[in-house]
Image: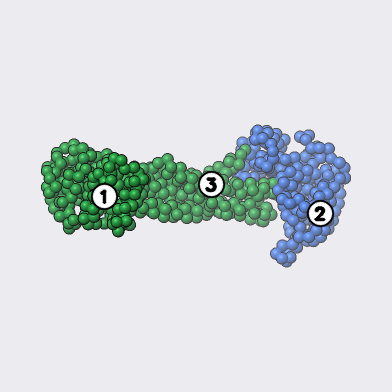
Amino acid sequence: MEQEQEATIPHECLAEVIEATRSYENGRVMALRGVNLRIEDGEFVAIIGSSGSGKTTLLQLLGGLDTPTSGEVKFREKALSEMGDLSTFRAEKVGFVFQSFHLLPTLTACENVQLPMVESPLSMRDREERAIFLLKEVGLADRTHHRPTELSGGERQRVAIARSLANKPDLLLADEPTGNLDCKSTAMVMELLARLHRENGMTLVLVTHDLSTAAHAGRCIEMSDGVVVKERTNPAAR
Amino acid sequence: MRLWTIVSRNLCTRRMRTALTVLGIAVGMMAVVSLMGLARGFENNWNQTLNARGTDAVVNRITTGNPIPGPFSQKFAHEIAQMPGIEASGKVLSSLLPVEHLPMMLVTSWEWESYIWDHLEIVEGRKQHDGTELAAMLGKTAAQMLNKKVGDTLKVIGTEVTVCGIYESTSMVEAGAILISLDVMQAHTDNEEKINFMNLRFEEDIDKARGREICQEIEANHNGLSASLANEAADHHSTTKAVKGMTLAVTLLAMIVGLASVMNTMLMSVFERTVEIGVLRAIGWRAARIRKMILLEATLLGVAGGILGVLLGFLAREFLYLLPTIRGTIRIEIGMDAVLSTIFFATVVGALSGLYPAIRASRMNPTVAFRHQ
């Protein structure tokens, strides 16, 4: 696995959600109700809960995809609300993995992985080399020029993981990454994510409703009706 | 990977829609470039005709919307011919008339023994014996179109006339015309003492500025008449004005159709790619880059439409030249300036059409976009 990640400082706070609420439709729908969450550098956190519990909304706030109605989200002690355009934050600090992979169907695997690097100062050649390197890391060295339609579900998700790592993010956010996969692919993807965390010290926040998937995480947060209802650690996974 | 890669793949993926949009713009641009070529062709043709005759200025009645100006009394011609600085003059009466199987031909008549006759090269037969002979000379193209040779008869201006000769002229207008003497034309078309053009040749020492002054004097002394230098006459000609007006109208129409067509395509494309655009925003693409991507797609459609439109314009010209009624009478000169300005215009139309979809796409919230799937 790549050894590019800088050594992590134990217990340093990477991201923090403070008293965050998120409402929709003029407050008629409350997705989050005063949530507090602290993610430490190098942690692997799973957020579980039933549909509508607010876990995806919480993930979107952490990744700067959405802003809280009230409360605050901080990244390395700096409030996201003070960062202005969050595109740069998302491009440089965060990697996203989605349930539906969200690969661009017109591009090859290699080109999809290069997408986040379009804003980076890297040369075209360097971008391509890094994309090929990452695809090799996720076990898809022989699929670099395949389009998403030519790949299996598991392979697509691995391309999406490679894409999320393109800009060497500090935080990897995965929203139901195995939700659309069969058992074999699920195991493969979870092993890949666990390896990223274990070998590179990658901070990982994973949203799932599958307890066996959540078991890979060192800390598990359970949500219900927009609030954190339970939190437990899993020393075996740490 | 460049932004171009994504842009071109997006356009290529929806091939039929891209092709139809490009074709929509191309048809409009074809009309624009053809009309520009028609206006240019007419201008050049007219200039060529006057140059071939050695004419320095033309006088005619001020008219609009009619390719042949209305007749005016030739008594003015005598006064004008006497003006200082004018070496020679030639009266002309022309009309567009149906001849034999052709719906419209230029029948022109010239003042007998005026300098205008001098430039004709008779390739077969002879010139009329005098200004009263009921005979016609045919331009070489006119003879081919009518399938007539010397000695044949021809029904024109309501009477049978004999073809006495066939001439060659460097002017396309003259090569496609039937030429009779002025007196015969006036007598047979109820235009006694009437003409609709007067050709003027200046004395040798008259420069352009003085020539313009003479033209102004003519206009000042003869209300309702227009006088212009030969190289500027085409610009003042009502046909040129009409074609240019038509070009402008078609250009505006093409712009509206092009704008609507590309905007519709791009809005549909943005709508269909809502999730994709949301993903690009999520992984850190700036709003400006999303705008650039959509604008590039729209601009590319415009460029392709412009290029195809120009090619179709050339094809349309060749097709029109195959038609017997058009071949030899109309010249469509599509110059490099028309080609470039048409492609530039189509590019601007494409870019403008992409503005709104681009702004809409760039303002897309990723979380809202994900809910679209």
Up-down relation of residue A27 to residue B93 (above or below): below
Say what amino acid the circle numbered 3 marks. Thr
Colour applied to chain B: green
Q: CA distance from mark 1 to mark 2?
A: 96 Å
Which circle, 3 or 1, is nearer the viewer? Answer: 1
User: Which chain does the residue under circle 1 lie in?
Assistant: B
Q: CA distance from mark 2 to mark 3?
A: 43 Å
Indicate the position of residue B140 as horizontal and vertical percent values.
22, 40
Residue under pointer 2: A17
**Seen in the image, is B204 located left or right of residue B180?**
right
- Please check whether the numbered discs 3 and 1 fall on a single chain: yes
Badge 2 marks a residue whose secondary structure is strand
The foreground one among B297 and B271 is: B297
User: Which chain does the residue under circle 2 lie in?
Assistant: A
Picture residue at 22% right of the left edge, 43% below the top: B116
Picture residue at 83% right of the left edge, 37% below the top: A7
Q: Quadrant of residue B65?
A: bottom left
Indicate the position of residue A30 as horizontal and vertical percent values.
75, 63
Picture residue at 84% right of the left edge, 40% below the top: A8
Say what amino acid the circle numbered 1 marks. Met
Q: Which mark is residue B83?
A: 1
Picture residue at 23% right of the left edge, 45% below the top: B88
**Seen in the image, is A167 located left or right of residue B330?**
right
Q: Quadrant of the C terminus of chain A?
A: top right
Q: Which mark is residue B299?
A: 3
Colour applied to chain A: blue
**Seen in the image, is B5 located left or right of residue A126?**
left
